[in-house]
Image (cartoon, rainbow, N blue to C red):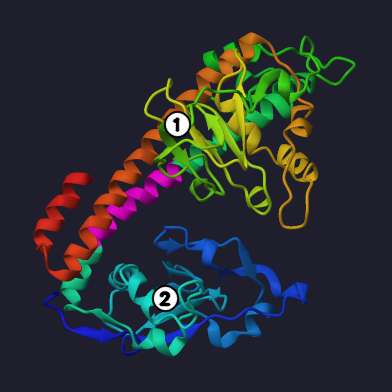
Amino acid sequence: MSKWPRVRIGDLGRVVTGKTPSTSVASNFGGPFPFITIPDLDGRVMIEQSARTLSANGGSTIQSSLLPPGSVMMSCIATVGRCGITTAPSYTNQQINALILRDGVNARFVYYAFKLLGEDLEGVGGGGSVYTNVSKGRFSDLTIPLPSGDEQRRLANTLGALDDKIDLNRRMNETLEAIAQAIFRDWFIDFGPVRRKMEGATDPVKIMGGVTTDTDEAARLANIFPATLADNGLPEGWEEGILSDLVELNPTEPLKKGVVAPYTDMAALPTSGPTADRPVPREFGSGMRFRNRDALLARITPCLENGKSAYVDFLPDNKSVGWGSTEFIVLRARPPVPSPFAYLMVRHPEFRERAIQSMTGTPGRQRAQADALSGFAIAAATTEIYSTFGARIEPMFEMIRANAEENQTLAAMRDLLLPKLMSGEIRLKDAEKIAEAAE
């Protein structure tokens, strides 16, 4: 047992349950205040932005729920135990309880203590095992261990060093993907280099839209793009095409029933970014099969609309076959198109809109149709351009994979240390050494 005394959450500050302003008043939304809901509690410690925001008008209607920076939040309805810390004046909806801390209590320490409360929350839930609802009063009565201020800080710093590295890698991956997406759109959708030539640009760096500041490299890249658009609106020498010319949809892969293979379910797919959760071994029954370097697209509502997609880079090797939900569409780039092209297409807004428009079926069970997606119009570039694109993009995806793997290792270390530290099973100074070695 922990050597630290346990203290009621309600005695550590003021507990606030969030509210939602009237959704019938459009002016309540869109503004400077984060409006944090459960999907925003996505593993980040510090919640700097949220999918939705409130205006000053919207905030004024639920002013008693305003959270200052440094408030610690936990989801307490249905999906329980997701945590985060506010970084700016913020609001939450009613599915989240938050603690506005009194002086002398370390927000990061409380965050880590909250992360261990998942089982306690399930135990006190008022809605049963299917639908857990932890009221403000019940939440306030839960207890957490509370060491001295110095020990709070040291423990928070130790675990925080791991989370800070995870966050740095996550931000790096977001930047890498944003660069890849920008190049993809500029080259293959907007024909940026060609248009800039037609507009009179002569500086290779400007022609290439600043993709590199190396003049020699920019000149080499600029030279592979034509200088004009043809009558059909495509770069001279390119051909009109459809997606199935460049990308194979739902390729056939051999996998016998009963064979144990890596399995990925819908929950493993992210709503943003390419990195899926690690697969689990499972006997193959029926489902979509895939290999490394394929892209996965959720085809069923609301997963498609929510953005669930992934780049497959998690199988043991490039010969391995994995499998997953029957609600996936698998996309595989056809040579010479580089593999990440299929994933970048999956994240392309116009393609996603085409997928949503293709959905058929009964309400709540509508699915995008692979046949409709195969006809998505896309220009076919030259082999040299695809090869050059791959040379620039593939190292970015390899770095994304490496960062994601490191994050999984760091998260596992953090999750191992957290309960052992809180229970007193290992000493803080030993945990500090472990965390330092991981940096």
Q: Residue at x 56, y 39 (%)?
A: 178
- Does label 2 or label 1 sit earlier along the sequence? 2
Quick check: 287 above or below 239?
below
Say whether residue 165 is magenta: yes
Q: Is residue 360 visible?
A: yes
Amino acid type indicated by mark 2: Ser
Q: Which mark is residue 114?
A: none
| Between 192 and 397, the one nearer to me in the picture | 397
Q: Are marks 2 and 1 in contact (CB under 8 Å)?
A: no
Q: Examine the residues drawn in magenta and state their main secondary structure.
A: helix
Measured Cα–Cα span from mark 2 to mark 1: 37 Å
Mark 2: few, some, or many residues within 10 Å (few <14, many ≥20)?
many
Q: Which residue is mark 1?
A: 313
Residue 156, image x, y percentages: 25, 65
Q: Seen in the image, is 389 located left or right of residue 121?
A: right
Res. 113 image quadrant: bottom left
| Quarter-of-image position of residue 200 | top right
Q: Secondary structure at mark 1?
A: loop
Q: Is residue 5 left or right of residue 45?
A: left
Residue 279 location (% of width, % of height): 42, 41
Does the magenta run of residues contain 357?
Answer: no
Q: Is residue 349 above or below residue 424?
A: above
Q: Which mark is residue 71?
A: 2
